[in-house]
Image (cartoon, grey):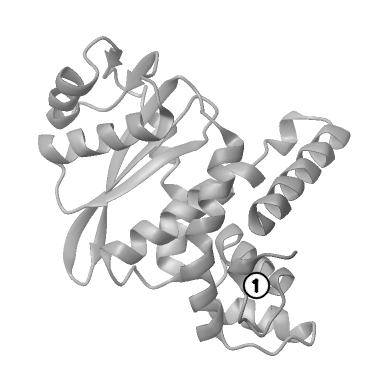
Amino acid sequence: MHSTRYRGYRFPPEIISHSVWMYHRFCLSLRDVEELLAKRGILVTYETIRQWCRKFGPEYARNLKRRQGRLGDIWYLDEVFLKIRGERHYLWRAVDQDGDVIDILVQRHRNARAAKRFFRKLLKGQGSTPWQLLTDKLRSYGAAHRVTMPSVNHTTARYENNRAEVSHQPTRQRERQMRRFKSAGQAQRFLSVHGVILNFFRFSRHQMRSENYRWLRARAFKDWSAAVAA
């Protein structure tokens, strides 16, 4: 990999990108990544890995987003609370019919203003309105729907939103591993990168033949290599 983005760094790009990938792909702490690298003879501190993730993670995610293009046209939305330094925040998340994370947004409130902000972020990122919108019965969704995308079919039937609720499970696992997020900005940065990387490497392995799974995995690694070297 030859890119000006890595100029001035002592470690080669392969080690930097691999460290960022391990941290965001698996439920590992920074010290876990440090130890795995040490097993391979690469001596680097966990604080250095933290700086790599903070600097390069969002950039990798932007490159991957450009490669994945627009996602599905059925959006499942849900919000879950996060406790950050004793204060309650809300993580808004949207996934499509395939379970891929479309986008997330961490906010202090879950009122109509917060819902409108999240809807506008989704529309800006996808570039078009969905065919169908599925949420729970929170009235903020209805208010934002009437303002930002009134022509879209909005469903609030019971259990229809389970796909979005299940998508919070990886976040809860990482939240426990990290002993809660330290700030809203940290949560937004980490989860934005985590969701994009999860999209590329999450396959329903039990639903496909082994050769198809290996082909998809190889393609994901190829896209990752291109994204971190671009």
- The reply, left or right, for residue 138 in relation to residue 151 is left
Q: Quadrant of residue 127?
A: top left
User: Which residue appears at 67% of the width and 35% of the height?
Assistant: 204
User: Which residue appears at 30% of the width and 72% of the height?
Assistant: 182
Q: Quadrant of the C terminus?
A: bottom right
Residue highlighted by disc 1: 16
* Residue closest to the far front: 4
Above or below, 59 relative to 9: above
Report x, y in % for residue 100. 52, 35
Q: Quadrant of the N terminus?
A: bottom right
- Type of residue at label 1? Ile
Report x, y in % for residue 205. 73, 38
Report x, y in % for residue 96. 47, 28
User: Which residue appears at 21% of the width and 72% of the height?
Assistant: 85
Report x, y in % for residue 148. 21, 23
Per the image, label 1 sits on a secondary structure element best described as: helix
Q: Residues within 10 Å of mark 1 (few under 14, many from 20)?
A: some
Q: How many marks?
A: 1
